[in-house]
Image (cartoon, helix red, strand yellow):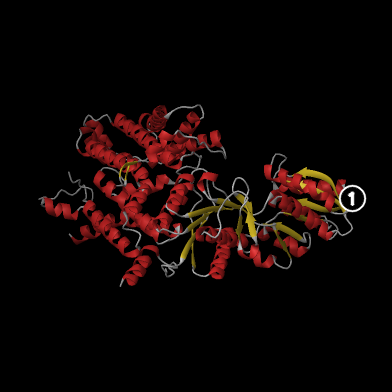
């Protein structure tokens, strides 16, 4: 009777939706995202389900507000507290505004972690970054070096000169560039994350450095513009474009050969890792403490820093072999 | 006390129905039944619903919005609308956050908030009541303007560091599960009930909404009443901003974005005629609780927010259409 009413109410109030059966002994982990209907987060939910299937006895509640507001996420958090879920793994819309609500969740015995977009330290037990600055800096030059066994001149096409993230990554890249034989960084130019300016800067690089072998673009805007500039100049195969990009925007350029490979975080792995960490913390199999390690299933383990955050892995490399699986996701 | 909200104003019946029949046929009674039904459905749908602490947490879904809805009800009854309320929240919250950076303490923060809210309301009121501009145009303009200022001040930054005593407004409990916001919500409801239904000011608000020209000839100072209503809405937005900012513990320019539509929905669901002239505070009070129960109930079932917006949209259209359809069929029958 009760189940019928439940289903009836759900159908009346909510329309079509999946109402998975709840087993009392299941561990329930809520994956809270910035907003529903975003490909990146749908992919993360897929990863979370993968982790749940691997662990067994875990139910994933994938939820989030309609638009990317802190108030919307607070309503979601309140309803999760009411349901007495075991863990909340959240990608936050606001690092400060969610703190009171998440503190309340922790005070009621719920494990709280943030992933992708973090929450201030007092509002979570740990934060999972998709990658780290040094791993990204290394990966962008490594991808170029892998394609250039004999070395050669490379140039960097960045976002704006004041872009914090890009500057750190380039700095990290310059630290390790000596490890790659023959790779010579000849210039760093800025496209300000504008398509047309990035395109012109890429053209400028090609004309002022005739021996240029690769353009490294650690910006999703710049990598697309550079790929376009290279194919428009008919230099596909001569000059290689790599860096950080989105599979949906880069699929065409990988197909044309202007870019052999590029990197970005893998949202499926991110959802998988967030779920694994939540499970281990909620089970008490790991504790979030500075320097501590928390297992992430097939991805190994994450080591926490003094501010209780950790990096998941190297950025994930996308190339002709896997781009078709990801281009519709994000 | 029962207003002639959903009878046709041009038709004067020979005999009024008895008080009991009128009560049973009233919008408020219907809403109360809906509220009870939703409450019952929720208890059946989720084992977590009937829990004092959970219900207490759920009241935050509507208390702040309802505080503004009461003032908005008066504005709509007077035949105007104020769509800038959520942006007033943003500007008030930003002003408080700005003051906090200079070490201002809680009492003065409240004063600043109310002053900024009243000033925003006065600006709207001046343009609508004194300049005679249509309120929908003016407040769409100030909707962008007020939030725009917040964005200029803050950009992608946030203000935090509110004093510890400030947290009481949005996070404090008066007794057991009774939050400060609940008490404030009740007090404001009683205040607005008295204002609309027990004072000559309330009478003139309804008169203006029914026919502003007739109201003017009857000696009501139409533009002054309207001006006061907009200032009042600004002040209520400031009070809601205090509660929300206190609950969040920080300010971003995107605070309370989109609330104006939820607040208007609440008012219309409460039986206030969107064309002005009629409505009750009791109706808005029950409507606020209905909306709170619906969002909390659907939240417990983890219904995605998108489905919730569809539900709210359908509810709003039904509520506006239903009285009109009933009136038409009724007229055709007689």
In depth, the one of B15 and A97 nearer the eye is A97
Q: Which residue is mark 1?
A: A210
Q: Is residue A239 above or below residue A200?
A: below
Q: In this rendering, would A294 be left or right of A58?
A: right
- Does B283 appear above or below A162? below
When asked about the image quadrant of residue B47, the answer is bottom left
The number of numbered discs placed on residues in the rendered structure image is 1
Look at the image and tell me in which quarter the C terminus of chain B lies. bottom left
Residue B278 appears in the rendering: no
Answer with left or right where residue B47 lies relative to residue B156: left
Looking at the rendering, which quadrant does residue A249 occupy?
bottom right
Judge by depth and name the residue closer to the eye, A116 or A68.
A116
Residue B144 in the image: state x and y as whole percent.
49, 39
Can you give x and y, in whole percent of width and height, for residue B219 in the image?
A: 22, 29
Give coordinates of residue B13: x percent, y percent.
Answer: 13, 50
Quadrant for the N terminus of chain B in the image: top left
> Which residue occupies 36% across, 29% down?
B130
At 42% from the left edge and 69% from the top edge, which residue is drawn?
A: A23
Q: Nearer the viewer, residue A250 or A291?
A: A291
Query: Which of the 4 image quadrants contains residue A24?
Result: bottom left
Answer with left or right where residue A42 lies relative to residue A303.
Answer: left
Q: Secondary structure at mark 1?
A: loop
* Nearer to me, B263 or B323: B263
Residue A221, position as x, y percentages in the image? 69, 50
Q: Residues within 10 Å of mark 1 (few under 14, many from 20)?
A: few
As drawn, A201 above or below B321: above
| Residue B301 appears in the rendering | yes
Chain letter belonging to callout 1? A
């Amino acid at each position: 009777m009760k189940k019928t009413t439940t289903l009836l109410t759900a159908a009346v109030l909510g329309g079509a939706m999946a109402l998975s059966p709840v087993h009392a002994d299941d561990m329930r982990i809520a994956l809270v995202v910035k907003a529903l209907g975003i490909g990146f987060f749908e992919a993360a939910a897929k990863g979370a389900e993968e982790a749940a299937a691997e662990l067994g006895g875990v139910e994933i509640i994938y939820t989030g507000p309609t638009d990317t507001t802190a108030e919307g996420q607070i309503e979601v958090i309140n309803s999760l507290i009411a349901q007495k879920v075991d863990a909340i793994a959240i990608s936050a819309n606001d690092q400060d505004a969610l703190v009171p609500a998440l503190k309340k969740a922790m005070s009621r015995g719920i494990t709280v972690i943030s992933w992708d977009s973090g929450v201030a330290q007092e509002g979570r037990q740990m934060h999972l970054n998709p990658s780290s600055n040094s791993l990204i800096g290394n990966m962008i030059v490594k991808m170029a070096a892998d394609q250039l066994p004999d070395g050669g001149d490379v140039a960097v096409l960045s976002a704006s000169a004041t872009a914090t993230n890009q500057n750190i990554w380039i700095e990290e890249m310059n630290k390790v560039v000596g490890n790659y034989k023959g790779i010579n960084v000849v210039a760093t130019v800025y496209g300000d994350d504008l398509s047309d300016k990035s395109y012109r800067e890429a053209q400028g690089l090609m004309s002022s450095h005739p021996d240029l072998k690769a353009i490294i673009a650690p910006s999703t805007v710049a990598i697309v513009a550079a790929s376009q500039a290279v194919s428009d100049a008919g230099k596909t195969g001569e000059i290689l474009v790599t860096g950080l990009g989105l599979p949906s925007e880069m699929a065409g350029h990988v197909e044309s050969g202007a870019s052999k490979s590029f990197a970005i975080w893998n949202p499926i792995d991110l959802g998988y890792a967030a779920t694994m960490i939540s499970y281990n913390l909620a089970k008490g199999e790991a504790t979030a403490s500075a320097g501590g390690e928390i297992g992430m299933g097939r991805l190994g383990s994450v080591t926490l820093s003094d501010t209780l955050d950790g990096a998941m892995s190297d950025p994930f490399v996308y190339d002709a072999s896997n781009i078709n699986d990801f281009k519709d996701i994000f | 006390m029962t207003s002639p909200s959903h009878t046709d104003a041009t038709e004067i019946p020979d005999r009024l129905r008895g008080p009991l029949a009128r009560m049973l046929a009233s919008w408020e009674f219907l809403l109360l039944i809906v509220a009870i039904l939703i409450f019952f459905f929720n208890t059946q749908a989720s084992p977590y619903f009937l829990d004092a602490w959970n219900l207490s947490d759920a009241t935050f879904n509507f208390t702040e919005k309802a505080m503004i809805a009461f003032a908005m009800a008066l504005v709509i009854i007077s035949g105007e609308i104020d769509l800038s309320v959520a942006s007033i929240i943003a500007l008030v919250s930003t002003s408080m956050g700005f003051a906090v950076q200079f070490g201002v303490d809680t009492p003065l923060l409240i004063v600043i908030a109310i002053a900024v809210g009243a000033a925003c309301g006065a600006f709207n009121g001046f343009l609508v009541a004194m300049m005679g501009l249509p309120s929908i145009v003016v407040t769409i303009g100030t909707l962008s303007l007020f939030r725009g200022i917040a964005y200029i001040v803050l950009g992608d930054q946030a203000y935090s560091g509110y004093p510890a005593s400030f947290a009481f407004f949005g996070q404090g409990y008066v007794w057991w599960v009774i939050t400060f916001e609940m008490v404030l919500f009740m007090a404001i409801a009683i205040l607005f009930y008295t204002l609309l239904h027990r004072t000559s000011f309330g009478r003139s608000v309804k008169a203006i909404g029914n026919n502003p020209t007739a109201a003017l000839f009857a000696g009501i100072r139409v533009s002054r009443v309207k001006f006061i209503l907009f200032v009042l809405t600004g002040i209520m937005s400031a009070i809601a901003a205090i509660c929300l900012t206190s609950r969040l513990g920080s300010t971003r320019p995107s605070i309370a974005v989109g609330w104006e539509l939820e607040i208007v929905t609440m008012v219309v669901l409460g039986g206030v005629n969107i064309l002005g002239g009629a409505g009750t505070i009791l109706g808005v009070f029950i409507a606020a609780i209905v909306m709170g129960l619906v969002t909390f109930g659907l939240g417990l079932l983890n219904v995605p927010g998108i489905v919730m917006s569809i539900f709210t949209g359908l509810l709003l259209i039904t509520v506006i259409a239903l009285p009109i359809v009933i009136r038409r069929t009724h007229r055709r029958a007689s």
